[in-house]
Each structure stands twice: as structure tokens, then as C-alpha cells.
Amino acid sequence: MSKLKEVLGKYECNKVLDVGTGRGEFTQILIDYLKSYDEIVCIDYSDRTQALIEEKFKDKNVKFYNMDCAKLEFKEELFDAVSISNALHELSDIQTVLKQMNRVLKKDGIMIFNEMYCDNQSAKQMSHVKLHHFVAKLHRLNGRTHNSTFKKEEILDIIQTLDMRVLDILEHSTHEDQLKASSDNITEERLTDIDDNISRLTNNFKETEYYDELVKEKENLIEYIKDNGLFSATELLVIVKK
Ligand SMILES: C[S@@+](CC[C@H](N)C(=O)[O-])C[C@H]1O[C@@H](n2cnc3c(N)ncnc32)[C@H](O)[C@@H]1O
């Protein structure tokens, strides 16, 4: 059984709020692994993925709202569980968002945090961390809030500010987890794909003073990935109770 299923499979949640849903990767995990749920409400301040989410989860009792998680438009204590996955590092004011998540969570409800982190990763996983940090830098140059990912202890410190009881902590998507699933090196095709994507993003800065530096950084990054391969960074799942 997957480690995530073992942990999430303990929780029966009627109404779930998933904050910063993006393309719904974590929503899919909630659907697959929670013991049960009645409804999952997804929010994201970008409406880019609304159609995708509505189509992808059309028979799963999932709703999507285009909403800023710093200003949740839900009444107090509406949800049995509130989750946030790989979005903490994209927030400009984490404490405001935590207060909002807490406000809409029922007493005895659970908060589910899932976040990749940047320290203690293998060389192969550092490819993902470096790739992520490069894309985050490009987003910042475009004026969007997207910080580098946190260290594991920094994530725990943030969660601790809620002063809630920790029910579960799990590290998943570790180097070893991924070795079990596949030991393949990165294919030429995947590498070309990554190169094309980050080149396209970098080209948006052609007319700026940063361009030459960004091209060098991009080339170093591709070299690193070629030499070391690519695994996802380890993620930390923490469940706390209100
Ligand atoms: C890296 S994606 C994570 C997607 C998904 N939760 C997952 O784990 O795969 C982060 C998402 O957070 C969203 N986000 C960032 N700041 C937000 C805010 N203030 N309000 C709502 N969504 C936000 C972004 O638009 C993006 O879709």
C-alpha cells in the first residue's frame, strides 16, 4: 500500500477545502486516498485550470472557485478538512492564509499540509529543486510571488505557529520510493522537453538586462540534469487537528 494511502486512508472527511489546487494533482490524491469524503471544494486565484478541474473530476463531487486564499469567501467552520499542497512557498503572506484556513475549519477538523522541500535531497532530486527554483525566479522577475521552496524545518516551524496537535507526519516521494518505482535515467526526449520549456520561459526576457545571465543559468541547469538525472524532491505531509 502506498505510504500516502496508509496515512490519508485513516481520515473520513465530509466537506474538504483544497487551497491552491492548480492542476489538481493533490486533489487527485485526496480523492484516491482519503477513507471517505462527500465533497471537495477547490480554490485557486488563477482561473487557468478551472475547466481542467471541472472536466477531470466531473463525477467526483468536486467544485472549483476562482478565489484568493488570503480572502476565503466561505463562512466560519464550514469544512471538516482544509488542505494546501505545494502552495505555501507561493504565498506572499502565509500567516493571513493560515488564519483564513483556520477560520473556515470546523472545531476538531483537520488541516493537511503537503509541501516539497529543498534540503537533504539526493543529487538526482536536486535537479527538481534547482529546476523549480529557476522557474520560481522567472516568475518573480515577472512580478509574481513565487519563493524558493522551504527547508523541512522551516515548513514545520510554519505549521507549528497554528499551535494544533500533530496527528501524522510523513515524508514521501523520497529517493528510495522513486528507485522502487523506476531506476531509469532521464530520457533524451524528457530532457529536450524540459530544455524547450525553460528556454521558452527564458526567451520572454530577451529584451532585458537579465537575459544573458538567465541563459547561462539555464544551460548550467540542463547540464546538471543531464549529469545527475531527475527525481522529484521529497515532500512532507503533515496533518494537524484543530
Ligand atoms: C505549485 S501549484 C500546486 C498545485 C497543487 N496543489 C499540487 O499540489 O500539485 C501552487 C498553486 O497555488 C496557487 N496559488 C498561489 N497563491 C495563491 C493564492 N493567494 N490564492 C489561491 N491560489 C494561490 C497557484 O495559482 C498554483 O496553482
Image (cartoon, rainbow, N blue to C red):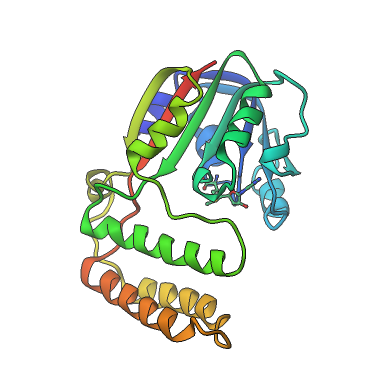
Q: Please, is residue 9 above or below residue 198 in the view?
A: above
66 sits to left or right of 235: right
In this orientation, does residue 145 appear? yes
Which residue: 55% across, 17% down? 12
* Residue 105: image location, x then y, percent: 64, 21
* Rendered-image quadrant of the C terminus: top right
User: Which of these two is toward me, 168 or 98?
Assistant: 98
100 sits to left or right of 216: right
Which residue: 73% across, 54% down? 47
Which residue: 41% across, 77% down? 195
151 sits to left or right of 204: left
Determine the residue located farthest toward the front in the rendered image: 209
* Residue 157: image location, x then y, percent: 40, 32
- Figure quadrant of residue 99: top right
Which residue: 36% across, 82% down? 216
* Residue 146: image location, x then y, percent: 53, 56
Determine the residue located farthest toward the top in the rendered image: 108
Q: Please, is residue 101 above or below residue 28 in the view?
A: above
* Rendered-image quadrant of the N terminus: top left
* Residue 62: image location, x then y, percent: 69, 36
